[in-house]
Amino acid sequence: MTHRISTTFDFSLEHDAFGRLVLTMPDGAQHVGVHPVRGFPISDPRRGVAVCTVEGRELAWIDEMDQLSPAARGVLEAELAQREFLPIIKRIFRVSLQTNPCEWEVETDRGRTKFLLKSGDDVRRLENQRALVTDAHGIRYLIPDPESLDRHSRRILERYL
Amino acid sequence: MDFNPDSWKSLPEGWRRQLASQLDDGETLIGWFETDLDHGLHYVAGLVALTNRRLLADKPHVENSVFTNAASSNSEANGHSTAWQSWPLSSDLELRAADEAGIGTLELFNPTGRLAYWRHTAARTASARRLESQWSTLQARRSHAAVDASTGPTVCPSCGAIITASDGMCTACAPGPPPPPVSSLFRLVTFAKPRATMVVLGLVLTFAGTAASLVPLYLTMPLINNVLVPRFNGQPVSVQLAYWYLAGLFGSAILAWLLNWGRLYVTSWVSERIASDLRTQTYSHLQQLSLEFFGGKRTGDLMSRISNDTDRICVFLSVSLVDFISDTVMIVMAAAVLLYASPLLALCTLVTFPIIVWLVYGVRRRLRHGFDQSTVAAAHLNSVLADTIPGIRVVKAFAQEHREIERFDRADRHLVSINDRVNIVWSFFGPIIGFLTELGLLAVWIASVWMIFHDQINLGIIYLFTGALGRFYARLESMLRIVYSTQRAAASSHRIFEILDRVPTVPEPTKPVHPSRLEGRIELRGVRFKYGTREVLHGIDMQIEPGEMIGLVGPTGAGKSTLINLICRFFDVAEGEILVDGVDIRSYPVAEYRKHIGIVLQDPFLFYGTIAENIAYGRPDASQAEIVAAARAARAHEFILQLPDGYDSLVGERGQSLSGGERQRISIARALLINPRILILDEATSSVDTETEREIQIALDNLIRGRTTIAIAHRLSTLRKADRLVVVERGQIAEIGKHAQLLHDGGAYARLHKAQMELVQGVGI
């Protein structure tokens, strides 16, 4: 069963009564329960978004979010916001041990939290200096600009990067 | 080319006389071949010569049953009995050269059987083949048949010289011989040259610092003689004078401190950079070396060279060498002070000096030998790690952890035992030096006592002397410790230069032809290749049109992967040539040529990085849209989206977190992205589920479309799609043709196909 992949952006997206995302293709075909997937979630989140079925079949590919109508874009962004959880670390209060695994206590844009870091490999430097920390449960935390952190946080981070 | 007038000139002197006596009037020498083994495979030299009339040989092994057509003449020469035999040329005679596993055989046949044969080592194979081709050319001329130019010797495409070496390298183009083996440590100087100013600054600071630290010593002499002793004896002395001397002592201490601080900073700055240059140059040179070098080396060994050995050299430069220089300076200055103070005493101290020098010399060689062994043992240890850690899955699958631990222990014990030997030598040497210096000091005291009793010396001088002497011998001792680090660093730098001196065997052409857009017409002419002594391809001739898909089939070890390696120019042909778009591939610059070839291998290696980075490996500047398009065509896009980070997902060493089918498709995307004209496909033999198999099929279809493809095919579907199939058996082409035609012919292909069908059907049950 092949699905035509629409790249012409004249499809529509909306939420139905059950809160599921519905994609209506130009030819009228409707797919319920689709979900958006970012192709490059870390390096380029705004570009390259796919809309896939529950099984993972790609239905639509959006090169640039701006190419969508504002309504569709809004729906998509809202759905993505629901699915994505990437706290941004603003401060690192303390790290429980010098060796790994250790417990981190941090302040994020979503509040204060603690998490367990398994190994030094889970702190990863991305292009343009950003850092990504992955905890023992697979939750990721982003540090968009390590240089702008306060001194204490920076010293802790330097050990890992 | 076949009537080589240089034959006589190239023949060794010893043979010339013998051969001359054998030849008749009007007989010209065409070619010769010197064997180095007798038929019992002992090292004995012999000669086979081809003239325009006969084939002559001394010491042939002649088959007793066929002793016809041979005219023999016995002659004693050089104490060996030589029985020259000859066979007149006739069209029913055949000369054939063959070799395997390091031993070659040259055989002479007539229709009834073998007449004679000669054995030789692999070193003479090229000569044997040359004689064989000279023979066939001669026979062809005699029967007025057309001479097949394609079996002539290989000509170097760059300079036009004939390639005679059996490894396919042109000696005229190859760079000159390596530089003479100067101590590798001295060669480090080339790395120091770019930092010359800082090095000089460091040296100046060393001199100054050492001189500054000798000043206090020199000041104590007048302090004692002019202030303390007279005061002790009751003479009037101004305290001011004492203050001046004390101030001088303090001042020189401060100065020495500052200068040493500067020296230490400068020298460590320089040595860090020299080590960095060493590391980066070695690594970049390593990258340029051809595949043949890596086949012979273990990963851990190479890693050890670039990390451990450069590290040792860095430590040597920043610590030991600097200490050595400052020690030398100190010794020279101290010796000067001593000689100035009292020549007689100075001579007494140096009494033990010659013995020390002699000991140093003796120990140096033993240490060097020990360190050479030690670095090799450390590299071996590294190799064990580099081997087992990537293969940890296999270790655990077979529950062989204890065996790997034991393997590591063995390597470790070996290292310890070698280090023990080095330490034994050193532990003997070190204290001996101390003992000898004590003896030297004793000699000084004896002499001073004698001189005091004869009023030839005063206390101040004695104090100066013992002070300077103390420094002299302390520095001498530490300088001798240098021997330890020097030999260690010398062993390490030797290993570094081993890499830097290595020349890539797939050389860049001297007159490169730059490929623009290749069409993809491939031609193989008389291609031969051997791995070491084993000849794997025995003359392949093939022509592939642009856009054609060729399927290579054949049993394992037939030479299919070798053919692919040659077309990719991972190795160079030993004989014959490979032409792409009518130009010998050796005329293209290697990197440019390979950019036009896409390769999908059996076991796709993915680097540690994101999926996007892996797909774009051949073209790092590819845009996001291009990467996604390549992934789509490779049917990888959807499973990539399923991954938690999509295209930004990290794939670990060897892409561990992906299944085989997924890695295959990423590898196909990687090849698609560079949009090559020529595609090499080494199909994976592992079976995947039908769903994935179909996906891979579609991906491959997308990949192959419009490109000249050479595929080592295992899948029946690939075989059916191929425009032509080439059956390679035992290094030669057995059949070429279309699938249906070959099946109809019922030859080698039909057999293989039948076997495969049975296998597939068996699995289906």
Image (cartoon, helix red, strand yellow):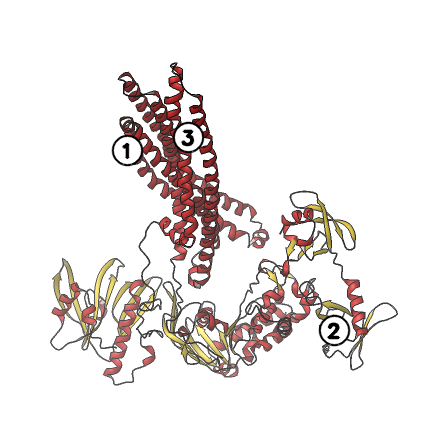
Q: In the image, which is nearer the foreground, mark 2 or mark 3?
A: 3
Amino acid type, callout 3: Pro
Residue B700 spot, x, y in % from top left: 59, 75
Residue B216 image label = 3
| Residue B735 makes an appearance in the image | yes
Report if residue A54 is visible in the image. Answer: no
Asked whether, in this view, residue B7 is left or right of residue B732, the answer is: left
Q: Which mark is residue B354?
A: 1
Quadrant including the C terminus of chain B: bottom right
Q: Identify which residue, B466 or B276, lies in the foreground.
A: B466
Q: Is residue B515 left or right of residue A33?
A: left
The label on residue B557 is none
Q: Nearer the viewer, residue B188 or B638?
A: B188
Closest to the observer, B162 or B487: B487
Which of pointers 1 and 3 lies earlier in the amino acid sequence?
A: 3
Say which residue appears at 65% left-offset and 43% top-offset: A98
B87 left or right, relative to B277: left
Going by the numbered disc 1, the residue's amino acid type is Pro
- Residue B463, position in %: x, y? 37, 24
How far, Cα to Cα, is label 1 from label 3? 29 Å
* Position above or below: B3 against A139: below
Crowdedness near tag 3: few (<14), some (14–19) or many (≥20) residues, C-alpha within 10 Å: some
- Residue at 45%, 57% in the rendered image: B281
Residue B470: x and y, percent?
38, 28
The answer to whether B638 is drawn above or below residue B328 in the figure is below
Between residue B668 and residue B423, name the one nearer to us. Answer: B423
Q: Of circles 1 and 3, which is in front?
A: 3
